[in-house]
Protein backbone atom coordinates (compact mmCIF):
# COMPACT_ATOMS: atom_id res chain seq x y z
CA UNK A 1 0.00 0.00 0.00
CA UNK A 2 1.18 3.50 -0.69
CA UNK A 3 1.94 5.55 2.39
CA UNK A 4 0.56 8.89 3.46
CA UNK A 5 1.33 11.56 0.90
CA UNK A 6 1.52 15.28 1.49
CA UNK A 7 1.73 18.13 -0.96
CA UNK A 8 3.51 20.37 -1.38
CA UNK A 9 6.71 19.26 0.34
CA UNK A 10 8.10 22.77 0.65
CA UNK A 11 6.45 26.14 0.70
CA UNK A 12 7.60 29.72 1.20
CA UNK A 13 5.04 32.38 2.07
CA UNK A 14 5.11 35.90 3.45
CA UNK A 15 3.42 37.21 6.56
CA UNK A 16 -0.28 37.86 6.14
CA UNK A 17 -0.75 35.35 3.35
CA UNK A 18 -2.71 32.15 3.67
CA UNK A 19 -1.70 28.61 2.81
CA UNK A 20 -3.43 25.31 2.10
CA UNK A 21 -1.70 21.97 2.66
CA UNK A 22 -2.98 18.67 1.36
CA UNK A 23 -2.84 15.13 2.70
CA UNK A 24 -3.86 11.82 1.17
CA UNK A 25 -4.13 9.05 3.76
CA UNK A 26 -3.22 5.41 3.32
CA UNK A 27 -5.90 3.69 1.28
CA UNK A 28 -8.70 2.50 3.55
CA UNK A 29 -7.72 4.77 6.44
CA UNK A 30 -10.57 6.95 7.60
CA UNK A 31 -8.97 9.13 10.25
CA UNK A 32 -6.57 11.94 9.42
CA UNK A 33 -4.72 13.96 12.04
CA UNK A 34 -2.47 16.99 11.63
CA UNK A 35 0.54 17.91 13.74
CA UNK A 36 2.94 20.84 13.81
CA UNK A 37 6.62 20.37 14.57
CA UNK A 38 8.78 23.32 15.60
CA UNK A 39 12.16 23.39 17.35
CA UNK A 40 10.70 25.21 20.34
CA UNK A 41 7.40 23.37 20.87
CA UNK A 42 8.14 19.95 19.43
CA UNK A 43 5.36 17.89 17.89
CA UNK A 44 1.94 19.29 18.69
CA UNK A 45 -1.52 18.04 17.75
CA UNK A 46 -3.58 20.38 15.57
CA UNK A 47 -6.78 18.47 14.78
CA UNK A 48 -8.26 15.16 13.72
CA UNK A 49 -10.87 14.42 11.09
CA UNK A 50 -12.99 11.32 10.69
CA UNK A 51 -15.83 10.87 8.22
CA UNK A 52 -15.52 14.51 7.15
CA UNK A 53 -16.05 15.72 10.73
CA UNK A 54 -13.55 17.32 13.06
CA UNK A 55 -13.45 15.02 16.07
CA UNK A 56 -10.70 16.58 18.08
CA UNK A 57 -8.87 19.89 18.17
CA UNK A 58 -5.59 20.98 19.72
CA UNK A 59 -4.73 24.27 21.33
CA UNK A 60 -4.17 26.40 18.23
CA UNK A 61 -5.80 29.69 17.19
CA UNK A 62 -8.73 29.79 14.81
CA UNK A 63 -6.38 30.77 11.96
CA UNK A 64 -5.67 27.06 11.71
CA UNK A 65 -8.50 25.11 10.12
CA UNK A 66 -9.00 21.95 8.18
CA UNK A 67 -11.44 19.76 6.41
CA UNK A 68 -11.82 16.23 5.16
CA UNK A 69 -13.40 15.07 1.94
CA UNK A 70 -15.54 12.02 1.28
CA UNK A 71 -12.52 10.12 -0.04
CA UNK A 72 -10.76 10.77 3.33
CA UNK A 73 -8.28 13.22 1.80
CA UNK A 74 -7.72 16.19 4.04
CA UNK A 75 -6.58 19.78 3.75
CA UNK A 76 -5.44 22.20 6.37
CA UNK A 77 -5.48 25.95 5.98
CA UNK A 78 -3.58 28.62 7.83
CA UNK A 79 -4.76 32.17 7.32
CA UNK A 80 -2.96 35.43 8.09
CA UNK A 81 0.40 33.72 8.36
CA UNK A 82 2.79 34.75 11.13
CA UNK A 83 6.53 34.17 11.34
CA UNK A 84 5.92 31.66 14.13
CA UNK A 85 3.90 29.46 11.79
CA UNK A 86 7.14 28.36 10.14
CA UNK A 87 7.22 24.65 10.88
CA UNK A 88 7.04 21.13 9.55
CA UNK A 89 3.37 20.19 9.18
CA UNK A 90 2.73 16.49 9.45
CA UNK A 91 -0.31 14.51 8.48
CA UNK A 92 -1.02 11.08 9.95
CA UNK A 93 -3.67 8.52 9.11
CA UNK A 94 -5.12 5.54 10.94
CA UNK A 95 -7.75 2.97 9.96
CA UNK A 96 -10.00 3.45 13.03
CA UNK A 97 -11.49 0.01 12.62
CA UNK A 98 -11.12 -1.05 16.23
CA UNK A 99 -12.14 2.11 17.98
CA UNK A 100 -10.59 5.38 18.94
CA UNK A 101 -7.01 4.46 19.59
CA UNK A 102 -4.90 3.11 16.82
CA UNK A 103 -1.45 3.53 15.45
CA UNK A 104 -1.04 6.63 13.34
CA UNK A 105 1.15 6.53 10.24
CA UNK A 106 2.80 9.75 9.22
CA UNK A 107 3.48 11.36 5.88
CA UNK A 108 6.76 13.09 4.98
CA UNK A 109 5.48 16.50 5.99
CA UNK A 110 5.24 19.93 4.41
CA UNK A 111 7.98 22.34 5.37
CA UNK A 112 6.48 25.86 5.57
CA UNK A 113 8.69 28.91 5.80
CA UNK A 114 7.05 32.26 6.52
CA UNK A 115 9.11 35.33 5.67
CA UNK B 1 2.54 21.42 30.84
CA UNK B 2 4.68 18.65 29.42
CA UNK B 3 2.75 15.44 29.95
CA UNK B 4 5.26 13.21 28.17
CA UNK B 5 8.92 13.67 28.96
CA UNK B 6 12.05 12.29 27.42
CA UNK B 7 14.71 13.57 29.77
CA UNK B 8 17.73 12.47 27.76
CA UNK B 9 18.25 14.74 24.76
CA UNK B 10 20.83 12.36 23.31
CA UNK B 11 22.32 8.90 23.67
CA UNK B 12 25.43 7.40 22.13
CA UNK B 13 25.85 3.62 21.85
CA UNK B 14 28.36 1.28 20.27
CA UNK B 15 27.17 -0.88 17.38
CA UNK B 16 26.00 -4.29 18.58
CA UNK B 17 25.23 -3.10 22.11
CA UNK B 18 21.84 -2.37 23.64
CA UNK B 19 20.21 1.07 23.30
CA UNK B 20 17.74 2.01 26.03
CA UNK B 21 15.55 5.05 25.51
CA UNK B 22 13.38 6.27 28.35
CA UNK B 23 10.10 8.11 28.60
CA UNK B 24 8.05 9.33 31.56
CA UNK B 25 4.47 10.53 31.60
CA UNK B 26 2.36 12.37 34.12
CA UNK B 27 -1.20 11.87 32.91
CA UNK B 28 -2.66 8.67 34.39
CA UNK B 29 -5.36 8.71 31.69
CA UNK B 30 -2.83 7.68 29.05
CA UNK B 31 -3.44 4.08 28.07
CA UNK B 32 -1.70 3.61 24.73
CA UNK B 33 1.93 4.33 24.06
CA UNK B 34 3.97 4.40 20.87
CA UNK B 35 7.56 4.88 19.77
CA UNK B 36 8.44 6.61 16.52
CA UNK B 37 11.77 7.07 14.78
CA UNK B 38 12.42 10.22 12.78
CA UNK B 39 15.08 11.36 10.35
CA UNK B 40 15.50 15.08 9.58
CA UNK B 41 13.02 16.46 7.03
CA UNK B 42 10.98 13.23 7.11
CA UNK B 43 7.84 12.18 8.91
CA UNK B 44 8.01 9.93 12.00
CA UNK B 45 8.11 6.21 11.28
CA UNK B 46 6.12 3.96 13.61
CA UNK B 47 8.26 1.43 15.48
CA UNK B 48 6.28 -0.27 18.20
CA UNK B 49 3.36 0.32 20.55
CA UNK B 50 2.02 -0.99 23.84
CA UNK B 51 -1.36 -0.90 25.48
CA UNK B 52 -1.66 -0.21 29.20
CA UNK B 53 -2.99 -3.73 29.77
CA UNK B 54 0.46 -5.10 28.93
CA UNK B 55 3.88 -4.50 30.42
CA UNK B 56 6.00 -5.67 27.50
CA UNK B 57 5.78 -5.87 23.74
CA UNK B 58 8.42 -7.18 21.35
CA UNK B 59 8.94 -6.79 17.64
CA UNK B 60 12.23 -8.06 16.31
CA UNK B 61 15.07 -6.00 17.73
CA UNK B 62 12.67 -3.63 19.46
CA UNK B 63 11.09 -4.20 22.87
CA UNK B 64 8.97 -1.72 24.79
CA UNK B 65 8.49 -2.03 28.55
CA UNK B 66 5.73 -0.25 30.44
CA UNK B 67 5.75 0.38 34.20
CA UNK B 68 2.37 1.92 34.97
CA UNK B 69 2.99 2.44 38.66
CA UNK B 70 6.09 4.50 37.85
CA UNK B 71 4.47 6.05 34.75
CA UNK B 72 7.55 5.06 32.83
CA UNK B 73 8.24 3.29 29.57
CA UNK B 74 11.41 2.35 27.80
CA UNK B 75 12.43 1.20 24.35
CA UNK B 76 15.20 -1.37 24.06
CA UNK B 77 16.99 -1.89 20.76
CA UNK B 78 19.14 -4.99 20.60
CA UNK B 79 21.53 -5.18 18.85
CA UNK B 80 21.93 -1.54 17.89
CA UNK B 81 22.92 -0.81 14.30
CA UNK B 82 24.30 2.36 12.70
CA UNK B 83 21.06 2.67 10.71
CA UNK B 84 19.21 3.10 14.01
CA UNK B 85 20.79 6.55 14.40
CA UNK B 86 17.84 8.95 14.41
CA UNK B 87 15.57 10.91 16.74
CA UNK B 88 13.22 8.71 18.77
CA UNK B 89 9.90 10.06 19.98
CA UNK B 90 7.72 8.59 22.65
CA UNK B 91 3.99 9.33 22.26
CA UNK B 92 0.92 8.64 24.36
CA UNK B 93 -2.81 8.73 23.90
CA UNK B 94 -5.90 8.26 26.05
CA UNK B 95 -9.30 6.90 25.04
CA UNK B 96 -10.94 10.01 26.45
CA UNK B 97 -8.83 12.17 24.17
CA UNK B 98 -9.62 10.13 21.08
CA UNK B 99 -6.85 9.66 18.56
CA UNK B 100 -4.75 12.60 19.74
CA UNK B 101 -1.08 11.79 20.33
CA UNK B 102 0.98 13.68 22.90
CA UNK B 103 4.67 13.54 22.08
CA UNK B 104 7.84 13.78 24.11
CA UNK B 105 10.63 16.10 23.01
CA UNK B 106 12.64 13.27 21.46
CA UNK B 107 16.00 11.61 22.08
CA UNK B 108 18.78 11.66 19.50
CA UNK B 109 20.33 8.20 19.24
CA UNK B 110 23.79 7.83 17.72
CA UNK B 111 25.03 4.33 17.07
CA UNK B 112 28.79 4.28 16.50
CA UNK B 113 30.39 1.64 14.30
Image (cartoon, coloured by chain):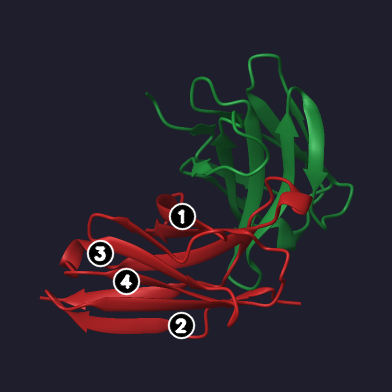
* Relative horizontal placement of residue A22, taking residue B29 as reference (left or right): left
Shade representing chain A: green
In this rendered view, identify the residue nearer to me: A103 or A74. A103
Which residue is pictured at 37% across the width and 58% down the height? B39
Instruction: Tell me the number on the disc at residue B49.
Output: 1
Disc 1 secondary structure class? strand
Q: Which residue is mark 4?
A: B76
Coordinates of residue A94 in the picture (x, y in percent)? 56, 35
Q: Which residue is mark 2?
A: B9
As drawn, B82 above or below B26 = above
Question: Of the residues under marks 1 and 2, which one precedes in the sequence?
Answer: 2
Q: Where, by quadrant of the figure, is residue A97 drawn?
A: top right
Q: Say which of marks 1 and 3 sits in front.
A: 1
Q: Residues at marks 4 and 1, common chain?
A: yes
- Given the image, what chain letter belongs to the residue carrying mark 3? B
Labelled pair 4, 1 in contact (Cβ < 8 Å): no
* Relative horizontal placement of residue A33, taking residue B14 as reference (left or right): right
Amino acid sequence: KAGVTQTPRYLIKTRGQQVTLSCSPISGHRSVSWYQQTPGQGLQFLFEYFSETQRNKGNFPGRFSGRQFSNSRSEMNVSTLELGDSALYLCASSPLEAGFQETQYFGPGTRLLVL
Amino acid sequence: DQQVKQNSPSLSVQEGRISILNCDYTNSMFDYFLWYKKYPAEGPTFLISISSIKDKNEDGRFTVFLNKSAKHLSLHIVPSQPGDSAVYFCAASAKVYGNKLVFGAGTILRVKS
